[in-house]
Image (cartoon, rainbow, N blue to C red):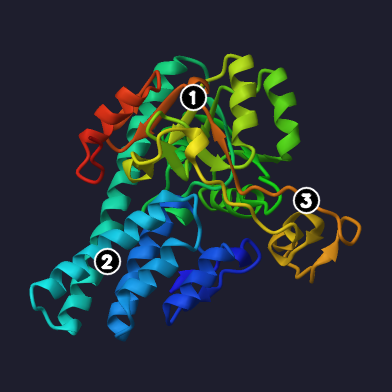
Amino acid sequence: MLLDQTRLPAREVELVCTDVPALVRAIRTLAVRGAPLLGIAGAYGVALAAARGDDVAVAAELLERARPTAVNLGYGVRRAGGAYREAVGKGVDPERAAAVALAEARALHQEDAEASGRMARYGLALLDELLPGGDGHRLLTHCNTGALVSGGEGTAFAVALGAHRKGRLRRLWVDETRPLLQGARLTAYEAARNGMPYSLLTDNAAGSLFAAGEVDAVLIGADRIAADGSVANKVGSYPLAVLAQYHHVPFIVVAPTTTVDPDTADGASIIVEQRSASEVTELTSLRAGVAGADAGGSLVAPVGTPAYNPAFDVTPPELVTAIVTEEGAISPVTGVGLAELCARSSQVTIS
């Protein structure tokens, strides 16, 4: 059972996925999204397949292919699938093996919630170190990184929320995050629910905020972090990193160690998901959700207009001030530093 994120902020609607193909559709249509939560959903999907008596290997393959960039999805699928295969290999009957897979998914869910809390503490400590004094932090964020993407209160958003609770958040600047408006529909929704001081802006207005000196730090999440520290995140993140460097503003990535992929050597090796042109050329129901309406695919460009619509872009490590995980923060960002950080985690091993 999922909160259907395509219906927010107009309506809070539960989406029930009774089999893995339904969950795959939910992942591809962004009803459930966000790197850590995709890992949790993937693990529960494997447990669902096992409980139904479906072919778990086939289900796992379908889930892993649902979105190629988010490394957590495959991690969650492999973790629950591995627990299931190990149980079966020991002669455990299918029903008990399904219970083992479910227990593993629940354990991953709990670990992610705990990691979220630790990331928030490490991130807030880093902000206070980088931005001493003043009357509160003015933070710019992109896409959505709160409780909607996590077993806990999120990644980058959880840091901003921690600052708010301690009276140290002056303003949360929320990028709309075009074309599907995850910032407007989801981050603003979460900020409002938590009583945070926030303002929404179009993505292309961020430069004027930097120029006016209104941004103290940028906080984003990540969908995949390569072994060299390159960060794949929602498209629009890389331009913010360039702006931040030019204006001498810290650019901070907050993500659990499960988002680090030691098998992806560098940013050029990251597969970037390309999405449908209709998300750009039509006012889809996802974008219309800001107004609580179903646009029914109203055109915003001439019929047949080609569109470039990558879901993510890649920020090189030299533009990243720090990466914050549940195991602490590294700055400057290097492959060696990232490996040492992740080696402290029980969830990721980098040789």
Dot 3, crowdedness within 10 Å: few (<14), some or many (≥20)? some
The alpha-carbon separation of the residues under discs 3 and 2 comes to 37 Å
Label 2 is placed on what type of residue? Gly
Residue beneath disc 2: 81
SS label for mark 3: loop
Q: Is residue 195 left or right of residue 132?
A: right
The alpha-carbon separation of the residues under discs 3 and 1 comes to 29 Å
Sequence-first tag of 1 and 2? 2
SS label for mark 1: loop
Residue beneath disc 1: 320
Residue at left 20%, top 34%? Answer: 344
Sequence-first tag of 3 and 2? 2
Q: Where residue 194 appears, x then y in whole percent?
A: 51, 49
Label 3 is placed on what type of residue? Ala
Label 1 is placed on what type of residue? Val
Sequence-first tag of 3 and 1? 3
Q: Is residue 51 above or below residue 336?
A: below
